[in-house]
Amino acid sequence: MTDGELAARLAEEAGRIACDLRESSLLDGKALGDAGDKAVNQFLVAAIRENRPDDGLLSEESKDTPERLSKSRVWIVDPVDGTREYGEKRSDWAIHVGLAIDGVASIGAVGLPGLNGGTVLRSDAPIALPEAAETPRMVVSRTRPAKEAVEVAEAIGAELVPMGSAGAKAMAVVRGEAEIYLHSGGQYEWDNCAPVAVARAHGLHCSRVDGSPLRYNNSDTYLPDLLICRPEWAARVLALVN
């Protein structure tokens, strides 16, 4: 099984686990989000250790160790990206299964279990990008849109599209529901490794907001910002941000 096939299989199965739990549980809100994170994390960690025992692993829901820093290949996962949306039984949450090779987001699968009966977008099987809209659309946080994103949207006349998780926003660009995802409010490696791998495989621009590359498997996992967008918008958005 290739890395891409493994990532997609894990994202799909993790999505089923999360959905089954949500349907059968009496919990809701934060308690449901915590339960989903725990159940999916247990599955992903066990599966990756079984299938790729020599690789490193970084998960939002597991205690980090320095062992991964000496590894060339490191799986970076977010069991439930958008636990608030998951706990509120919305559809805009995601499962992230990414593989960084020598610091580059190289393989990824992003599951969108709440969408159309479950969808997995993957780096090894890119789909054709839909036509871009004449008026650009920019996905932003549904609860706290970043100031820089709002200002850029005003400058280019973009329509703001509020949405939940980082993975859902990034995949909205891949799916043709938006042209730009600009984030400056702070994230961690697990928030965007898999989405960046998928977006890059679909020919989208992916970088920090200063235009520098996104690098993974760092000792400090904090990634303050990122831009995922249609290539034709990258130069203008980066110039406005900077």
Image (tube, helix red, strand yellow):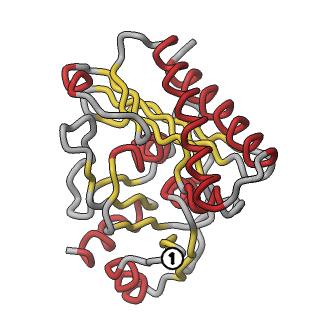
Q: In the structure shown, which secondary structural element does the residue marked by tag 1 occupy?
A: loop
| Residue at x-position 64% and y-position 58% | 87
Residue sitting nearer the eye, 90 or 193: 90
- Horizontally, residue 9 falls left or right of residue 16, namely left
- Horizontally, residue 45 falls left or right of residue 114, namely left
| Residue at x-position 62% and y-position 65% | 177
Residue sitting nearer the eye, 69 or 20: 20
What amino acid type is highlighted by mark number 1? Answer: Thr
Q: Residues within 10 Å of mark 1 (few under 14, many from 20)?
A: few
The correct choice, above or below, for 45 with respect to 234 in the image is: above
| Residue at x-position 47% and y-position 46% | 195
**Image position, residue 186 (x, y; %):** 31, 62
Image quadrant where one finds the C terminus: bottom left
Residue sitting nearer the eye, 38 or 70: 38
The correct choice, above or below, for 123 with respect to 233 in the image is: above
Q: Which of the 4 quarters of the picture holds residue 59?
A: top left
The correct choice, above or below, for 160 with respect to 41 in the image is: below
Residue sitting nearer the eye, 192 or 171: 192
The residue under label 1 is 143
- Horizontally, residue 154 falls left or right of residue 1, namely left
Q: Which of the 4 quarters of the picture holds residue 100?
A: top left
**Image position, residue 120 (x, y; %):** 65, 40
**Image position, residue 14 (x, y; %):** 64, 34
**Image position, residue 38 (x, y; %):** 55, 38
The correct choice, above or below, for 174 with respect to 134 in the image is: above
* Count of marks overlaid on the render: 1
Image quadrant where one finds the N terminus: top right
